[in-house]
Image (cartoon, rainbow, N blue to C red):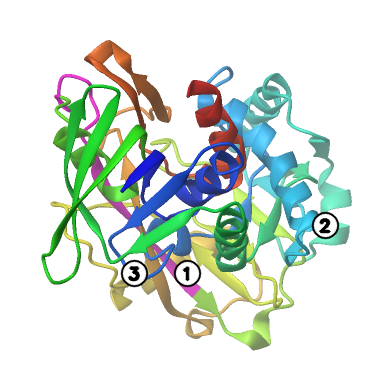
Amino acid sequence: MDYDVVIIGAGVVGLACAAVLSQKYSVIVLERHESFGKETSSRNSEVIHAGIYYKSGSLKAKLCVKGNKLLYDWCRDYKLPFRKAGKYIIAVNPDEEEILESLYRQAQNNGVDGIHRITASNFNNVEPNVRASASLWSPSTGIVNSHLLMQSFENKAIANGCDFAYNHSVKEIVKKYGGYSIKVTDTENNYSIINSVFVINSAGLDSDTVAQSAGIDIDKEQYRLSYCRGHYFRIKPGKSSLVNHLIYPVPPADALSLGIHITLELDGQLKLGPDTMYMPDRFKDYSVPDELKDKFFSSVSRYLNGLEIDDITPDQSGIRPKLQKAGEPPRDFVIREESGNGLPGLINLIGIESPGLTASIAIAEYVYSLL
């Protein structure tokens, strides 16, 4: 089988790439699971981010800000459920107010739409159950149904003639004259070969090993991933009126995540999370230990009134593909065409964690520009 483009991985970014690239190229998407979005793309906060937190000039900053607008347009065009709910980032003491001010400057540098400071009295009028000495209001932050978003990308790609091969795993990528030969296996270990001019590695948690299978030294290139699990706890429905918007504390000093925040869902329910827990190996363990309950309650009780510990229960977890190890500073997305490694036409997307969902269409357009 011959195609212009092989996309490895049917998470939200791989699917967005399929929807965009299939407008011009013949495309096949290879996915080892039985359907799309079985890992990181379906285990997150489903937040449409504004682009506040990321270093100015980074791919994360540029693609998040652009992707925010593209994603809202896509949702409107394809009649997907979403809510431009808005987000408050809050400080509860003078030290956090300094961090909040630096976030405000960062957001302005990144071109974030509409962000502005809110006085304590005005904030208390709209969120009376939340204690904050200062806050920022991000009107362009929202929520989306990630499953229906991914379904719409798949539908668009199929309408463009894209093929999907679920239950197929990539075993080897071999460079040949004019392109690549990709060896894949199905669930019964039957081998097949797919030939293409371009390969898009959007394999998420295993994007580093896929790059390695093409012959890239992932330690030299600093592509090796670490798994970082984030847990969520759900607030019982009777307390769903405690907040009216997304509520984020200032990020923790370690910069591993945006902190345990309160997320609205489209049905009006609330959940807390995620936290961060680096995994000792690459085992995909999605358990949510009940003993984390005290940690979550304590974290949120710093700023939320009216919540009791028995109001929260374990929900789900997700695993982030982190390029930085525990204790290291955050790193940018890797989106790289590998001619420099002797592999022209291979594009690696590695370390695509948050804000990957928000940036998905912008990432796809960026990949398109690299072909």
Q: Is residue 218 left or right of residue 132?
A: left
Q: Amino acid at mark 1?
A: Phe
**Coordinates of residue 138 in the picture (x, y in percent):** 76, 43
What residue is at 73 percent from the left and 51 percent from the top? 74
Q: Which residues are magenta?
A: 217-233
**Coordinates of residue 68 in the picture (x, y in percent):** 69, 41
Which residue corresponds to mark 1? 297
What residue is at 13 percent from the left and 52 percent from the top? 281
Tell me how far mark 3 sits from mark 1, CA to CA: 9 Å
* Quadrant in which residue 313 is drawn: bottom left
What residue is at 34 percent from the left and 69 percent from the top? 292
Nearer the observer, 284 or 73: 73
Q: Secondary structure at mark 2?
A: helix
Q: Secondary structure at mark 3?
A: helix
* Quadrant in which residue 247 is drawn: bottom right
Q: Amino acid at mark 2?
A: Asn
Q: Is residue 290 left or right of residue 226?
A: right
Pointers 1 and 2 in contact (CB under 8 A)? no
Q: Earlier along the polypeptide chain: callout 2 or callout 3?
A: 2
Q: Amino acid at mark 3?
A: Leu
Which residue corresponds to mark 2? 124
What residue is at 43 percent from the left and 55 percent from the top? 11
Q: Is residue 261 above or below residue 236?
A: above
Tell me how far mark 1 sits from mark 2, CA to CA: 21 Å
Nearer the observer, 288 or 197: 197
Q: Is residue 115 left or right of residue 222?
A: right
Q: Secondary structure at mark 1?
A: helix
- Which mark lies nearer to you, 2 or 3? 3
Q: Say if the magenta span includes residue 85.
A: no
Q: In the image, which disc is placed on residue 292?
A: 3
Q: In the image, which disc is placed on residue 34?
A: none
